[in-house]
Image (cartoon, helix red, strand yellow):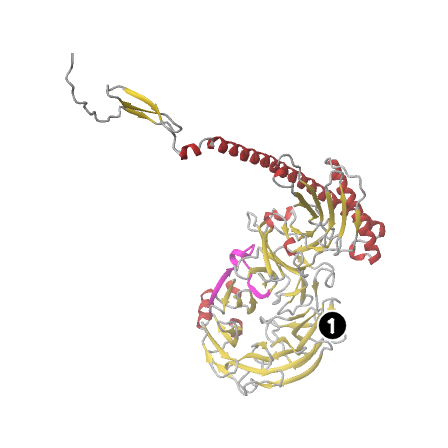
Amino acid sequence: MNWPKRPIQSWPARAVGTFRPYLGGYSASPNLLGTNVTRFTTLPARAREERGAILILTALVMIILLLIAALATDLGAWYRQGQEQQRAADVASLNGVQAHDASLKAYYDANGVTGYSSLTDPQKADAEDQAFQDAVNSVLGALAAGGMNITDVPVITTAIPPAESTATVTAVDGTSIVITRTATNAITVNVGRQGDQYFSNFVRDAPEITREGSAVISNCNADCSRDIEIEPPFPGFEASGKGDGFGPLLRGDTQIWAVNHHIRGSGQGNIVCMDRNTEDFCAGVGNDGTGLFSTDRFDTHNRPIPEYIDNDRDRIYFAGRDRSTGMAGLACFDMAAGGFCSPNDFVGFWAQPVVNWSAIVSVVGPWEWNGNLYILAQDGQLGCVNPDTMTACGTWNTDAVGSGVADLSGRPRVSWGQVHNNRLYMINTSDAGSIFHCWDLASQSGCWGGVQTYNSGMSWYSDDDYLNTLSYTTSGDVNGFCRVDPIGNWGRCVNLSGTSMWEPTNLYNYVTPHAVSWVGGAFTFDTAYGPRTYMTLGNANKSVCFDWLTNSGCGVADHWTLAPDGWTRPYGLALITDDCIVGLGHDSRYFTLGVDTMETCTSSTVSTDVYPCECGDGTFRYGVLELPAELLAVLNSADATVTGGGTTITGNLMDGPFDLSPFNGVAAPLELTILVDSKLNSDGSLAWREPYSAQLALTVQPTLTGN
């Protein structure tokens, strides 16, 4: 049967599915019957080129990791080796420096010297030879004890310091050892060896590992202790019934002298010596060794003009009246000899009658200028005395004469004076008023050719109510001199050229509310706060401070609360330390006032130079300052300040020893100041009453440091 021919139908190509792996695969396409036919295809050229790359990369990464592991292993070994070498060098250097120091000390003892500087140059060389050999032996012994095998003999070269001594040797394992005594007397040990190598030799050579230890005896074991005496604060004490001295006069660090005023009775005693440490009369001083000099020789003045103490000549000079002649002038007392000066003990200038009950002497002074002493009479006459020979060196009538000043036989009005530069500024008293005038001691003539007078109305005992002082600007410069009457509430000052007068309003307004009757005196001191005038107010039982820099008051001391029984009646004052004023009151009652606190002194200051200690190796170093425990127990504070080489450091000794080693190398001496403040007992008395010593020393055991 013939079938009719049909045309062949063209089927569109349709992909049933394809799969093409990265490195080859197959392709499926439908045939005419619609079934899938599989056939292999050929890979592209790029794919054929990448065949096997992953295997190569993996191999490279594995090699790098192996190299890192090998290097890390060797690096760890080198680090551990460095640590071991550092420990060995530290221990060896510490052993070496002790051996060196001990050997030097043994050499000093054997040769009968105390230190390196006492040796001759040949001895220094010999001492260093022995000491460095001992140090080398000690170093090598320490290294051997740590497991290092050393069989060679070291090569040693010694030199006198500051030149260095050295020794070198090589251990069996190749470790190089270099030992040095440096210019600073440290012992250094340098240990070097090539690092152990396990896996990194195909990358790099093993490094040379070097470590160094250094040791020095920081305090050099020197024995140069020095005690620095620290006196306790002086609270004051009572020597009741022994007269009224205007003083006080300070002799050395312990004695306080006074020349009593208005003394007439037989055997009452003109001169008293008190010991501030024992708070009693000076032992072995006086007519009977009791600190009291009884004499009927002189009447003494009754005014607050301090006497003059000459510690170089060991003498006291005071204005007085010779009872045997009735002459007023200058007397001299020899403290060392315990009696009046010889061969001359008095220079009389003017006839002086006895005036009223207390034999008041109307002559005051003395004041020192250019090696001579000057005293001033009530009528303005001036006398000069040579203090060595106790002979007159001149008399003058000052500008006050003829200005209405009472004569010596009249009322007992005593003058006041103060030397500034080459001039004596004076205030005399008369019926005409207060007379201000000036005498040029160099030219022996009046400064102004006249006087300044202020008449406030005088009375028989008006001098008892006057306070006289130099005046100062707020910059601390002297600009005049003043008289203040706190009872009458007035005051006047005259400038140094005598051309003007003004009222010191702030001064007398501050003092007046505290005064009642009869005042003591005015005493100006150059303090750490600038010039300050301290005024004793006698019967008011108070003392007042005036600060010239601020032109205002700086405190009031109420002796009713400060004195044990409330009664002091303050007279004279003296600056006993930078921080403390000592005062003298009625019946020889001694008291103290803080320069700034106006309370009983509780602080004490000592200033001294500090020198370094000589170490056994000839170097010089500063030590450690410390206070004894028994002193620390009674203190509130103990502050030390040390200055040297342009540097100042401070420390609190209450916290422990104060190390001065930061000043090593600084030229001597250092300046040391210690300020201590005492605790108070429950009754208000000082807890610290005995002197103690601060110890400056280098006597503690060696402190070794390794690097």
In the rendered view, would you say 319 is above or below 197? below
Name the residue rendered at 78%, 57% in the picture. Answer: 117
Q: Between 219 and 565, which is closer to the camera in this rendering?
A: 219
Residue 595 coordinates in the image, percent (x, y): 55, 62
Q: Between 523 and 379, which is closer to the camera in this rendering?
A: 523
**What range of the chain is rendered magenta?**
551-574
- Judge from the rendering whether residue 145 lies leftward or rightward of residue 1; answer left or right: right
In the rendered view, would you say 26 is above or below 85? above
Residue 150 falls in image quadrant: top right
Point out the image quarter for the N terminus. top left
Amino acid at the residue labelled 1: Cys
Residue 387 falls in image quadrant: bottom right
Is residue 193 shown to the viewer in this render?
yes
Residue 468 coordinates in the image, percent (x, y): 53, 73
Residue 146 falls in image quadrant: top right
Residue 675 coordinates in the image, percent (x, y): 59, 56
- Judge from the rendering whether residue 627 lies leftward or rightward of residue 167; answer left or right: left
Name the residue rendered at 51%, 74% in the picture. Answer: 471
